[in-house]
Image (tube, helix red, strand yellow):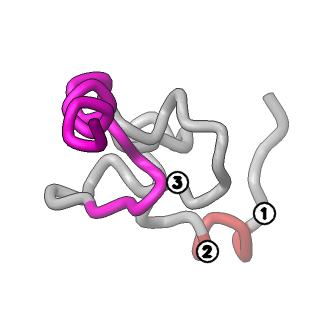
Amino acid sequence: MPRMSKKLKKELAFFLNDRGRRSYNELCRKCQHTCKQSFRATVIECPRYLSKRAKGEHKNNEL
């Protein structure tokens, strides 16, 4: 894996784990959108995220 420049390291400091690799939040890892949040974020609010349970409840509420 190529090394990161100093400038890139400074930009991504919030996302780098102890190994120096980018790490995203558990909910953001498989997300297709580019609004990824850091693994360090404890409270996450994503308008694009819907859990599987929320989708089922949402459909039932519409009927």
Q: Residue at x 39, y 55 (%)?
A: 38
Q: Which residue is mark 3?
A: 36
Residue segment shown in magenta: 45-63
Asked whether the residues under the numbered discs 2 and 1 touch, taking CB atoms below 8 Å apart as contact, a structural biologist would say: no
Q: Residue 40: x, y in percent?
A: 26, 55
Q: Residue at x 16, y 60 (%)?
A: 43
In this view of the protein, which residue sits in the foreground, 12 or 20?
12
Which secondary structure lies at badge 3? loop
Specify which label sits upstream in the sequence, 3 or 2. 2
Mark 3 or mark 2, whichever is nearer to me: 3
Q: Which residue is mark 1?
A: 5
Identity of the residue furthest to the left in this view: 42
Q: Residues within 10 Å of mark 3 (few under 14, many from 20)?
A: some
Q: Which residue is mark 2?
A: 11
Q: Amino acid at mark 1?
A: Ser
Q: CA distance from mark 2 to mark 1?
A: 10 Å
Which labelled disc corresponds to residue 39?
A: none
Q: Residue 12: x, y in percent?
A: 57, 64
Which secondary structure lies at badge 1? loop
